[in-house]
Image (tube, rainbow, N blue to C red):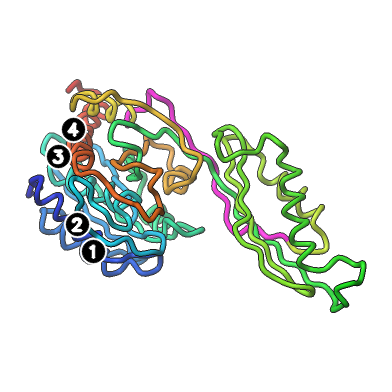
C-alpha cells in the first residue's frame, strides 16, 4: 500500500481535473482513477455500469464504502493553480472529495477490515445509474461515507429527496385568437397548479419544506412539454401530490420520471461521530448540517439501512459555477480527516476504543 504524499495527492487531483467527465462520458476518467488506485495498492476495476471500483483488505473486520462520483455538469473551467486555489470543473463537485477518498483509503493503515472506494457515474443525472448499480451488485457495507463537498470541518447528515415530473399535452390545431386553451398555456397552467398545491411555504431555502423547480418548458399551440423537479423533505407525501396535480392538469399526461426519498441520520450515527472526532483531532471544530439538494446518499439509503454520512472538502456554493475551485489546504486537511475517521470508525463498528 502506497501512502500519498501531499504533492502526490495534489498531482492526483490535478490529473483528474484535466480529464473532462460530463455525465455519460466518464470512461477516460474512470480508467485514470482505476490506474491511480492500482498504483496505490488497491485492487481496482471498472464495473458493468462504468463505475471505478477499488478495494483493500487488511484482515477480518468491517467493510466501509467510500463513494464519490466521476461525472460533472457540462462546461469548461480551465485547470489552473492560482496561489493555493486549484481551479477546474469538478474540483468541488466532486473530484476533490473522490480524490480525498482514494488518498485516505491508501493511507488508512490504522483500519482493520475492508475498504471499498467507488467513483460512480451519472450522479448528476436524473437516474443516478452508477449508484443504482452499486446498490444492486454489492452487499450493504457496515458503514458508508458519501463524497460530496461538505466543507472540510462539516459533516452532512442528510438531503432532501426529489420527484422529477414530465407533463405532456397535445391539442387540436386552432387559430391563436381562439378562446380554447393552447398546449403551451396548459403546460404553464400545470406549473401554476403545482405551485398552488405546494403552498406559499414551499422553498429551496428550508430543509423541512418542498422546493419546486421548473426545469424546462417547450412547445407551441398544439403540443407542449414541461419538466418539474420538486425537492421534498422527510415524510412528504409525494404520491398524494402527484395524484392531485394529475387531476388538476388534465387533459395532459403527467409522468413520474424518477423519485427518491429524503434521507437523514442523527448526530450519534457512528459515521458522524467518527468524522467529528477526526475533524477535532486535526484542530477543527466539527459542525453538522443538512442539505436541500439530493445526492447518491439518497439513492443508497433507499435500500441500505447502515450508518452513513457525507463528507468532503470544498465549498458547495461553488458547485457547477464558472469559479469552481478547491483550496489545497482544505483538500489536504480533508485527506487527514478521512484517514483518521476510518480508524475511528473501525473502533466504533467493532466496539473497541481507539
Q: Which residue is mark 1?
A: 18
Q: Quadrant of residue 150 in the image?
A: top left
Q: Are marks 1 and 2 in contact (CB under 8 Å)?
A: yes
Q: Which residue is mark 4?
A: 340
Q: Earlier in the sequence, mark 4 or mark 2?
A: 2
Which type of secondary structure does the marked residue at label 1 adopt? loop
Q: Which residue is mark 3?
A: 108
Q: Residue visible at 44% across and 57% down? A: 124
**Residue 18 point in image, percent of width and height:** 23, 63
Instruction: Report how far apart the C-alphas of labels 3 and 2 lie in the structure.
Output: 22 Å
Q: Earlier in the sequence, mark 4 or mark 1?
A: 1
Question: Dot 2, crowdedness within 10 Å: few (<14), some or many (≥20)?
Answer: many
Which type of secondary structure does the marked residue at label 4 adopt? helix
User: Which stretch did the figure color magenta?
Assistant: 254-271
Q: Which residue is mark 2?
A: 14
Instruction: Report how far apart the C-alphas of labels 3 and 1 lie in the structure.
Output: 27 Å
Instruction: Report how far apart the C-alphas of labels 4 and 2 lie in the structure.
Output: 23 Å
Q: Earlier in the sequence, mark 3 or mark 4?
A: 3
User: In the image shown, does 347 or 175 lie closer to the viewer?
Assistant: 175
Q: Are marks 3 and 4 in contact (CB under 8 Å)?
A: no
Instruction: Report how far apart the C-alphas of labels 3 and 4 lie in the structure.
Output: 7 Å
**Residue 176 point in image, percent of width and height:** 85, 73
Amino acid at each position: 500500500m502506497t501512502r500519498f504524499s501531499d504533492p502526490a495527492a495534489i498531482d492526483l487531483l490535478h490529473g483528474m481535473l484535466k480529464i473532462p467527465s460530463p455525465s455519460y462520458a466518464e470512461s477516460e476518467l474512470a480508467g485514470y482513477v482505476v490506474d491511480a488506485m492500482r498504483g496505490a495498492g488497491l485492487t481496482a476495476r471498472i464495473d458493468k455500469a462504468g463505475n471505478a471500483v477499488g478495494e483493500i483488505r487488511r484482515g477480518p473486520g468491517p467493510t466501509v464504502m467510500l463513494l464519490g462520483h466521476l461525472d460533472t455538469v457540462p462546461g469548461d473551467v480551465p485547470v489552473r493553480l492560482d496561489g493555493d486555489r486549484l481551479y477546474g470543473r469538478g474540483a468541488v463537485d466532486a473530484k476533490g472529495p473522490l480524490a480525498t477518498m482514494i488518498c485516505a483509503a491508501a493511507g488508512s493503515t490504522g483500519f482493520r477490515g475492508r475498504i471499498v472506494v467507488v467513483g460512480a457515474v451519472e450522479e448528476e443525472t436524473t437516474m443516478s445509474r452508477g449508484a443504482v448499480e452499486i446498490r444492486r451488485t454489492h452487499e450493504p457495507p457496515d458503514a458508508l461515507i458519501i463524497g460530496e463537498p461538505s466543507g472540510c470541518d462539516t459533516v452532512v447528515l442528510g438531503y432532501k429527496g426529489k420527484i422529477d415530473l414530465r407533463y405532456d399535452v397535445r391539442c387540436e390545431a386552432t387559430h391563436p385568437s381562439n378562446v380554447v386553451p393552447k398546449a403551451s398555456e396548459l403546460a404553464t397552467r400545470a406549473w401554476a397548479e403545482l405551485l398552488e398545491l405546494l403552498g406559499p411555504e414551499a422553498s429551496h431555502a428550508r430543509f423541512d419544506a418542498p422546493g419546486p423547480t421548473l426545469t424546462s418548458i417547450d412547445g407551441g399551440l398544439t403540443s407542449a412539454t414541461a419538466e418539474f423537479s420538486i425537492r421534498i423533505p422527510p415524510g412528504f407525501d409525494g404520491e398524494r401530490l402527484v395524484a392531485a396535480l394529475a387531476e388538476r392538469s388534465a387533459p395532459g399526461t403527467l409522468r413520474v420520471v424518477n423519485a427518491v426519498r429524503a434521507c437523514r441520520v442523527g448526530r450519534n450515527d457512528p459515521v458522524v461521530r467518527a468524522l467529528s472526532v477526526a475533524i477535532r483531532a486535526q484542530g477543527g471544530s466539527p459542525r453538522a448540517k443538512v442539505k436541500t439538494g439530493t445526492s447518491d446518499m439518497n439513492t443508497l439509503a433507499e435500500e441500505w439501512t447502515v450508518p452513513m454520512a457525507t463528507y468532503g472538502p470544498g465549498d458547495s456554493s461553488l458547485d457547477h459555477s464558472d469559479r469552481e475551485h478547491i483550496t489545497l489546504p482544505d483538500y489536504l486537511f480533508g485527506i487527514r480527516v478521512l484517514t483518521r475517521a476510518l480508524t475511528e470508525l473501525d473502533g466504533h463498528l467493532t466496539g473497541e476504543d481507539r
